[in-house]
Amino acid sequence: MLLTRLHLGRYSCVGKQLALMEARNVIARIVREFDVQFAPDQNPKAFEDGLMDTFTMTLAPLNLVFTPRKGPIPAGGRLPN
Ligand code: HEM
């Protein structure tokens, strides 16, 4: 979603694969370590409706709550900081 603007147009982004790899890495690390929920005051639809195409993408506020995951350490162990 955020990165859809990378691949449009005549001169598409040469860093696309690097940026996608980094984004996947960061997202994977977050969901591995945390349960992620909307904050009580967050309306998910307001976030979606607030996205604006401004060459890259302008985001609406998105308040989330990150709770460290309980339970067994994931296969491969906790990731280094
Ligand atoms: C989230 C990260 C990134 C976003 C959102 C992004 C976005 C964009 C966008 C919108 C364009 C213009 C595409 C067009 O004109 O149609 C672009 C071009 C470009 N990007 Fe990225 N980019 C990202 C990461 C990177 C990285 C990591 C590199 C280099 C390692 C990079 C290098 C370039 C270059 C050199 C161009 C110009 C390509 C050309 O004019 O031929 N970008 N990028």
Image (cartoon, grey):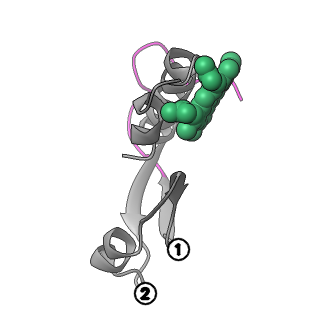
Residue type pointed to by label 1: Pro
Q: Is mark 1 within 8 Å of ligand 1?
A: no
Quadrant housing the C terminus:
top right
Residue that carries the numbered disc 2 in the rendered image: 41
Q: Say if 48 sits above or below 79 in the image.
A: below
Q: Position of residue 1 (x, y in %)?
A: 36, 46
Residue numbers of the magenta segment: 68-81
Question: Observer-nearest residue: 25 or 65?
Answer: 25
Is 80 displayed left or right of 7 in the figure? right
Q: Position of residue 39 (x, y in %)?
A: 44, 76
Q: Is mark 2 within 8 Å of ligand 1?
A: no
Residue at the (49%, 39%) spot, across then down: 33
Residue at the (41%, 24%) spot, across then down: 74
Residue type pointed to by label 2: Asp
Res 19 quadrant in image? top right
Is 66 displayed left or right of 36 in the figure? right
Residue 56 highlighted magenta (yes or no): no
Q: Main secondary structure of the magenta part?
A: loop
Dot 1 falls on a residue whose secondary structure is loop
Furthest toward the front, the residue is 10
Q: Which disc number belongs to residue 33?
A: none
